[in-house]
């Protein structure tokens, strides 16, 4: 159909057959002039097929849980989800990627085993990619750059080759602490033996041998449904919590406060706070255990002395940041924030990956509150 043009001036690129538009005016949109993103869109078909199988099997497992599996098998799957989840949240995430607290060796071993149960690659690889995610957040160097869309941030990034920037920029991040940790090194070295045993074989055998479950129910419910569920909940932190929610701490970034994700991900949905203060062991401002089981777990471990030097941000520094860059949705009364308006600014500029980032300001270290402080923590941070 011919366009109905009332004006005589050329209209620019409205219709491809617009006779009033000269060829010179038909410029490709700016985006299209960019070179194609090298590497990152090369599909890895092995992963695509494995994830399709996993998701179909997980749906079948959910159906079996409702129709034929023993209640104990479903409860077992739930407990495994929480254990594997803690291996990611309290382990790979808050302990190893962000150094937001320290753990004695028994807790590190426990978290390493929990982490292996979740099979999200070795702690070393997970932490490296996660530091890169924080330090170069939402750029091509971010492994699951949410600017590429919800699907890419959720799972798409695991189905394609990495963007060259991820690898180049990733090499700039210090991993010395992870190299030195013997528990991390052990898991990395034996990952391909440990992971199948801990994530797939033992969870399938326990229901069969301990309470007479069928192999099929054990495999599809306790193993594949539970694994797929834990993966998707984790991925929601990268997808949903980078798209939906309020931004009380920094409105200029995409990570947001997402209650639904926080509940499912054992406290990891308070993502606006977490990207602003990645070295806070609570990954949230308030110590609300109901929406943050991981904080409850770490605090319990601190009670028996296995967790210590838990770093958190002082209310004064938080309110300064809320006043300066928040979107106005912070739950504290605004007058409370105003009290701190003139107190100077100790909050972070630029992205940090966590405690010990070379760009972390000394004054931020000094104003941090350290809970359950160890006597040797000064030389050891
Ligand atoms: C999984 C991980 O699901 C999920 C992580 C989610 C993170 C969430 C964070 C949110 C906050 C925490 C919330 C937790 C909530 C938990 C709730 C729980 C209830 N820097 O990797 P390659 C080098 S995993 C520097 O093969 P390709 C690398 O060393 C699921 N260098 O890249 C290597 O060098 P060399 C199961 C880097 O070929 C080379 O590059 N696992 C970096 O592009 C090639 O490395 C899978 O599905 C870096 N950052 O392949 C496996 N990265 O050769 C998926 C790489 O010298 N992965 N390098 O050794 C793969 O198959 C591949 O990695 C790929 C990319 C296809 C994705
Ligand atoms: Zn994030
Ligand atoms: Zn993080």
Image: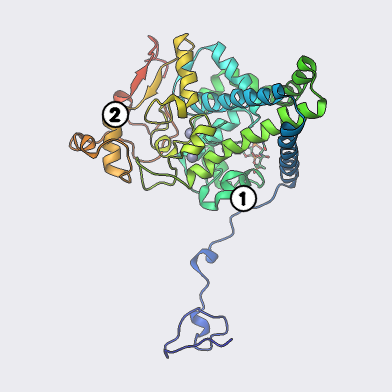
x and y, in percent, of residue 17 in the image: 57, 84
Which image quadrant for residue 372?
top left
Disc 1 marks which residue?
40
Measured as percent of width and height from the top left, residue 176 is found at 51, 25
Question: Residue 277 lies in what quarter of the image?
Answer: top left
Nearest to the observer: residue 133 or residue 258: 258
Depth order, front residue of 48/42 = 48
Q: Nearer the viewer, mark 1 or mark 2?
A: 2
- Of the 4 image quadrants, the one containing the C terminus is top left
Provide the secondary structure element on which disc 2 rests. helix
Marks 1 and 2 sit apart, C-alpha to C-alpha, by 41 Å
Dot 1: within a 10 Å radius of its alpha carbon, few (fewer than 14), some, or many (20 or more) residues?
A: some
The total of numbered circles placed on residues is 2
Mark before the other along the chain sequence, 1 or 2: 1
Asked which secondary structure carries label 1, the reply is: loop
> At 37% from the left edge and 9% from the top edge, which residue is drawn?
375
Q: Which residue is mark 2?
A: 315
> Residue 287's image quarter?
top left
Looking at the rendering, in which quadrant would you find the N terminus?
bottom right
């Amino acid at each position: 159909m011919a366009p109905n043009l009332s004006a005589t001036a050329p209209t620019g690129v409205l219709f491809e057959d617009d006779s009033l538009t000269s060829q010179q005016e038909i410029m490709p949109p700016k985006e299209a002039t960019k070179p194609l993103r090298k590497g990152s869109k090369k599909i890895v078909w092995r992963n695509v097929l494995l994830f399709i199988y996993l998701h179909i099997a997980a749906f079948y497992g959910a159906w079996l849980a409702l129709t034929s599996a023993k209640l104990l098998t479903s409860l077992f799957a739930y407990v495994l989800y929480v254990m594997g989840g803690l291996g990611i949240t309290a382990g790979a995430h808050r302990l190893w990627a962000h150094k937001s607290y320290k753990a004695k060796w028994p807790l590190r071993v426990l978290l390493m085993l929990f982490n292996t149960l979740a099979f999200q690659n070795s702690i070393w690889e997970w932490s490296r990619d996660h530091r890169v995610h924080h330090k170069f957040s939402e750029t091509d160097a971010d492994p699951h750059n949410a600017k590429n869309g919800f699907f890419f941030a959720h799972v798409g990034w695991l189905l394609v080759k990495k963007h060259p920037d991820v690898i180049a920029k990733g090499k700039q991040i210090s991993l010395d602490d992870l190299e030195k940790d013997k528990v991390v090194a052990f898991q990395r070295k034996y990952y391909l033996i440990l992971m199948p045993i801990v994530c797939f074989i033992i969870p399938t055998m326990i229901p069969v041998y301990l309470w007479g479950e069928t192999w099929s129910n054990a495999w599809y419910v306790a193993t594949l449904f539970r694994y797929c569920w834990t993966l998707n909940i984790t991925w929601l932190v990268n997808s949903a919590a980078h798209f939906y929610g309020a931004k009380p701490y920094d409105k200029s970034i995409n990570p947001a406060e997402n209650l639904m994700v926080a509940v499912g991900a054992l406290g990891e949905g308070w993502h606006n706070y977490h990207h602003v203060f990645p070295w806070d062991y609570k990954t949230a401002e308030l110590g609300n255990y109901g929406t943050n089981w991981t904080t409850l777990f770490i605090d319990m471990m601190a009670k028996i002395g296995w967790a210590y030097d838990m770093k958190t941000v002082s209310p004064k520094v938080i309110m300064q940041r809320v006043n300066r860059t928040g979107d106005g949705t912070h739950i504290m009364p605004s007058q409370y924030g105003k009290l701190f308006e003139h107190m100077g600014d100790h909050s972070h500029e630029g992205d940090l990956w966590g405690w010990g980032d070379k760009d972390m300001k000394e004054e931020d270290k000094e104003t941090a509150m350290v809970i359950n402080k160890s006597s040797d923590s000064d030389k050891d941070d």
